[in-house]
Image (cartoon, helix red, strand yellow):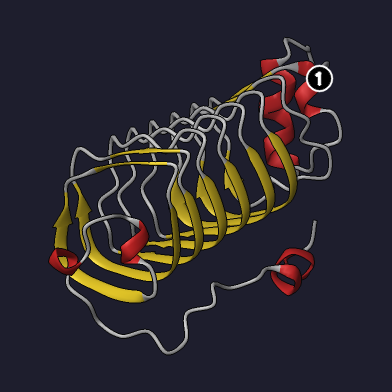
Amino acid sequence: MKKGIVSSKFQEPKLKNLEPKKISDSDTLENLSYGIYQDSRIHRDFQEEEIDSVIFQNIHFQDCTFERVEWIDVLFDNCDLSNLHFDNNLFTRVIFKNCKMMGTTFVDASFENVKWSSCNASYSNFASSIFSNGWIEKSNFNDTNFSMIKIHQFLLEDVTLRNSEWLETSLKDIDFSKADISSCHFDLSSVKGMIIDSSQAMFLVGMLDVKVKE
């Protein structure tokens, strides 16, 4: 898959005419919509809410849980999202930039036009999630679980995926040639049709216990 195919279709968050606000001015997650929040902490639990048109800059989400929250047109810039639970959340036109997301769970989540740039998402869990027109660049996704996901139109560029799991997941036409897949765990059905370079081919051959005769 060529970069232009994804990037030309990728929809950036719609974040025009937003004004700075204070976290203390909002009592619910829904009230956080349509604003810019900077240099603060959020320590709350939210359920079945919608957050729309927001920029979070240097925000530490501390011990929060988000149940069935819908995120639309959101930028997370230099935020700490580590060890949080975003299970069953919906993300539409969202960018994670320079974020810490170690140990964060996104089980059964849905991602449409979502980009991760310069993020550390090691040990995160995306099992059973859906990805459409996504983009990961210059990020660390080592030891991450991508099992049983559905993925379509996805760009991986300068990404480390070492020791991550891709089981029961169709990777047909997904280009891994610019990703580090050392020690990744794939099953035979998942790798069918995936795109790799020649150096990665030897790793996959060895992983599938195939012997190459010299």
At horizontal 21% and vertical 44% (from top left) the residue drawn is 44
- Which of the pair 155/60 is nearer the observer? 60
**For the view shown, which residue lies furthest in the right direction?**
193
Q: Is residue 22 above or below residue 207?
A: below
Q: Position of residue 85 (x, y in %)?
A: 36, 34
Q: Quadrant of residue 168?
A: top right
Image quadrant in which you'd find residue 98: bottom left
Residue occupying the point 61% across, 34% down = 129
**Is 25 drawn above or below residue 185 in the view shown?**
below
In the structure shown, which secondary structural element does the residue marked by tag 1 occupy?
Answer: helix
| Residue found at x 39% / y 54% | 119
Query: Dividing the picture into quarters, in which one does residue 188 lie?
Result: top right
- Judge from the rendering whether residue 71 lies leftward or rightward of residue 184; answer left or right: left
User: From the image, which quarter does the C terminus lie in?
Assistant: top right
Residue at horizontal 28%, vertical 41%? 82
Residue 117, above or below 144: below
Residue nearest the viewer, comparing 162 with 73: 73
Q: Which residue is mark 1?
A: 189
For badge 1, the amino acid type reads Ser
Q: Outermost residue, bottom direction? A: 17
Dot 1 crowding, Cα within 10 Å, few <14, some 14–19, many 20+: few
186 or 16, which lies in front?
Answer: 16
Q: Position of residue 97 (x, y in %)?
A: 40, 63
Judge whether 181 appears above or below 119 on screen.
above
